[in-house]
Image: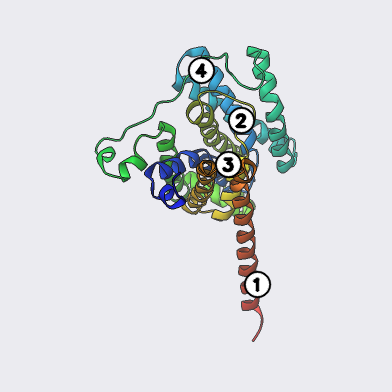
Amino acid sequence: MPSLVDMLLNPSFWFSVLRVTTPIIFAAIAALITDKAGIMNISMEGTMLFSALAGTIVSALTQSAWIGLLGAMAAGVLLSLTLAYFTLELKTDVILGGVAINLFADGGSIFILYLLTGDKGTSVSLASKVLPSVTIPLIDKIPVLGAIISGHNALTYIAAATVFAVYFMLKSTPLGLKIRAVGENSSAAQSVGVSAKKIQYLSLALSGLIASLGGAYMSMAYLPNFSRNMTSGRGWIALAAEAMGQGGVLATSAASLVFGFADAMANALQMFSLPAELVGIIPYVATVIGLILYSVRIKNAKKRRGASKKPL
């Protein structure tokens, strides 16, 4: 039986870290965009789950993985626009709306699957397609590094590209400036002709689009089909990563990698004959610890700011 040190030194372990981090990064970046626009979208879990189902169904109907991916993206955008309509037009509380989507997704996805296929729990009867893996020329020949970076599913590389695209968008484009302006002071933004409602609609739609890629990854890359509650709390973990990132794209991605490491560690520790219940809670314990450290850090920062304002 390999030792823990051997496991950590094995390139396949770090390959799995990137693999399990992919859906978390998509959902965390999706949550960050709406947070920047001043509207918290906590429906990551439900959006990913419905997108995973949509990708499976559409790819089976069209026999094309890429068209299935488009179906997953459409489902994510539609769900987020639904949340936007209820929140921005009907003035429903956005937190309650997000919770409702998450709760509905759990049973609703299985109900839809059963109506369409008769399957209960998994899409075993659907001949769904899987998105391809990509071997990076030259890099795949580099010892150790090639085994870690090359050979991932296409969506893993799209996730990395999404991080830098969103970073550039928020920092260097007019749309990014408007999103940040609305999030920081919507009244001031509207005073210079920026429609806060329009920007928040757009932010929620973009959030749903990115989160849907995480859902598609779960059913078209991580696993070859859809199964009930297959996101397994990754949407909530992504929200924790976004909170720990404190609004920074790169910091949020780094926090996602930390949680991905915990998830990969939980998978790897199954080789050591540890109780499955103990191993299974590792990612969630890591999430709780991360949020505690984040809360302590924020509290201490507020104390320091308060102390600096006291008169001498």
The mark that comes first in sequence, 3 or 4, is 4
Residue 303 tag number:
1
Distance from label 2 to label 3 (Cα)? 25 Å
- Which class describes the residues within 10 Å of circle 3: few (<14), some (14-19), or many (20+)? many
Kind of residue indicated by mark 2: Leu
Three-letter code for the amino acid on which mark 4 is drawn: Ser
First along the sequence among labels 2 and 3: 2
Q: Give the residue displayed 27% in from the left and 44% down from the top.
A: 143
Give how far apart the Cα atoms at labels 3 and 4 are.
36 Å
Q: Residue furthest front?
A: 1
Residue at mark 2 = 49
For marks 1 and 2 on the same chain, the one whose residue lies earlier in the sequence: 2
Residue for point 61% across, 54% down: 188
Q: Nearer the viewer, mark 3 or mark 4?
A: 4
Amino acid type at mark 3: Ile
Q: Which numbered mark, 1 or 2, is in the foreground of this view?
A: 2
Residue at 49%, 26% in the rendered image: 220
Mark 4 vs mark 1, foreground winner is 4
Determine the CA span between mark 1 and mark 2.
Answer: 40 Å
In this rendering, the answer to whether 286 lies above or below 271 is below
Q: Tell me if label 2 and label 4 are in contact, CB under 8 Å.
A: no
Q: Are marks 1 and 3 in contact (CB under 8 Å)?
A: no
Q: Which mark is residue 128?
A: 4
Q: Earlier in the sequence, mark 2 or mark 4?
A: 2
Q: Earlier in the sequence, mark 4 or mark 1?
A: 4
